[in-house]
């Protein structure tokens, strides 16, 4: 029997536009004072409910954007993050069934001010750029392509993924954006006829339960006709992983499904290094801050040598990313790294890498 899709990953949230009331629970009295002062400047009605410290703000139709602008200016980021908010249309009073819709004020404000991102996601105006990963001893032979998300604005210009993901985190849209990035990467890799391995990034915090949250991704791989052994799911932002056991469960799910896995930014901090013994990924990527200038910096050289030896002892292949100098490439070729990636070799492009005519 088929299961329904994960509502957390699949559903796009509604952004209020209708008139009604906002119920706000500030963390402190002086935060409430700031809200009152800001609303008074705009002549917006605000009632106090002293029993639970709630402020009730009447918002006219299409007045949410103006309210968001005022709050974004009046409150600090911490105050917006720690305040809670609930929108009730018309004169409706909150009931127990509405408690699941209570959000951080920061989430509400970010969504109001970043409707463009929701528009991009709903219309799926995104694409994939592909950056090749080369064999270190044959830097003109491609081992894999990393799939990199780009948004597309209404004029066709590309939108940087860092901008999209930063807003998505603050607007509680990371589940939906990460899923869209994964499925788009799969579809575009198949459409481009890529026959190498493909590295597809994912954020562990965007996955509650792999069995439910990753069903769409698995279906996309199979429907696209990609060989599961061709796909490597790459964990990004390893420094922000607070639940290694959850991540281990996600990676185990991928492996049981026939995929391989990679850890990003090895050596960029303590977290990724500490994950190696328990996660045992198939690949690790050396952090670009370590790789850059390694040929001339003995401390970096020692660190990379030790990391490569440790990875190989655990049967983990090593990718050095951020290679931008020929001297660094030469050093990496002499020190047992398996694969290399960076602007020196190739920049991200809309299709798979091909050698220049006459150089093949």
Image (cartoon, grey):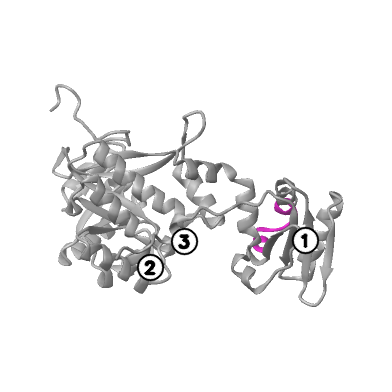
The residue singled out by tag 3 in the image is 8
- Asked whether 55 or 236 is in front, the reply is 55
Q: Main secondary structure of the magenta part?
A: helix
Give the secondary structure at mark 2: loop
Within-10-Å neighbours for mark 3: few <14, some 14–19, many 20+: some
The numbered disc on residue 205 is none
Left/right of residue 54 with respect to residue 163 in the rendered view: right
Q: Which residue is mark 2?
A: 209
Q: With respect to residue 71, does 210 lie above or below?
A: below
Magenta stretch in the rendered image: 71-80
Callout 3: SS: helix
User: Which comes before the other along the chain, label 3 or label 2?
Assistant: 3
Sequence order check, earlier mark of 1 and 2: 1
Instruction: Residue at 45%, 51% (x, y): give it.
Output: 177
Mark 1 residue crowding within 10 angstroms, few (<14) / some (14–19) / many (20+): few
Which mark, by number, is residue 91?
Answer: 1
Kind of element beneath mark 1 = loop
Quadrant where the image shows the C terminus: top left
Q: Position of residue 350 (x, y in %)?
A: 32, 33
Q: Position of residue 150 (x, y in %)?
A: 42, 40
Q: Based on the picture, tell me whether residue 74 belongs to the magenta stretch.
A: yes
| Image depth: mark 1 or mark 2 in front | 1
Q: Is residue 16 magenta?
A: no
């Amino acid at each position: 029997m088929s299961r329904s899709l994960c509502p957390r990953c699949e559903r796009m949230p509604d952004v209020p536009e209708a008139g009604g009331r906002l119920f706000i629970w500030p963390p402190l009295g002086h935060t409430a004072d700031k809200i009152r002062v800001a609303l008074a400047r705009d002549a917006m009605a605000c009632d106090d409910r002293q029993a639970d410290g709630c402020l009730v703000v009447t918002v006219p139709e299409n007045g949410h954007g103006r309210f968001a602008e005022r709050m974004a200016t009046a409150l600090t980021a911490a105050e917006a993050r720690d305040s809670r908010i609930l929108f009730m249309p018309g004169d409706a009073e909150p009931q127990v069934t509405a408690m699941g819709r209570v959000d951080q004020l920061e989430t509400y404000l970010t969504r109001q001010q970043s409707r463009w991102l929701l528009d991009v996601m709903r219309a799926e105006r995104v694409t994939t750029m592909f950056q090749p990963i080369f064999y270190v001893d044959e830097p003109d032979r491609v081992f894999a392509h990393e799939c990199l998300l780009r948004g597309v604005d209404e004029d066709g210009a590309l939108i940087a993924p860092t901008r999209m993901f930063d807003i998505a985190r603050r607007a509680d849209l990371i589940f939906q954006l990460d899923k869209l990035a994964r499925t788009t990467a799969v579809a575009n890799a198949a459409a481009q006829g890529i026959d190498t391995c493909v590295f597809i990034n994912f954020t562990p915090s965007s996955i509650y339960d792999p069995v439910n949250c990753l069903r769409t991704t698995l279906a996309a791989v199979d429907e696209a006709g990609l060989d599961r052994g061709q796909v490597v799911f790459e964990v990004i932002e390893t420094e922000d992983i607070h639940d290694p056991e959850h991540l281990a469960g996600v990676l185990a799910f991928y492996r049981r499904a026939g995929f391989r896995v990679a850890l990003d930014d090895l050596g960029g901090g303590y977290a990724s290094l500490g994950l190696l013994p328990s996660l045992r990924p198939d690949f690790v990527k050396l952090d670009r801050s370590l790789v850059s200038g390694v040929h001339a910096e003995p401390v970096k050289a020692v660190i990379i040598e030790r990391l490569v030896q440790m990875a190989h002892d655990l049967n983990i292949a090593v990718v050095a990313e951020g290679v931008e100098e020929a001297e660094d490439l030469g050093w990496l070729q002499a020190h047992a790294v398996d694969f290399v990636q960076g602007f020196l070799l190739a920049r991200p492009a809309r299709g798979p890498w091909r050698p220049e005519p006459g150089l093949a």
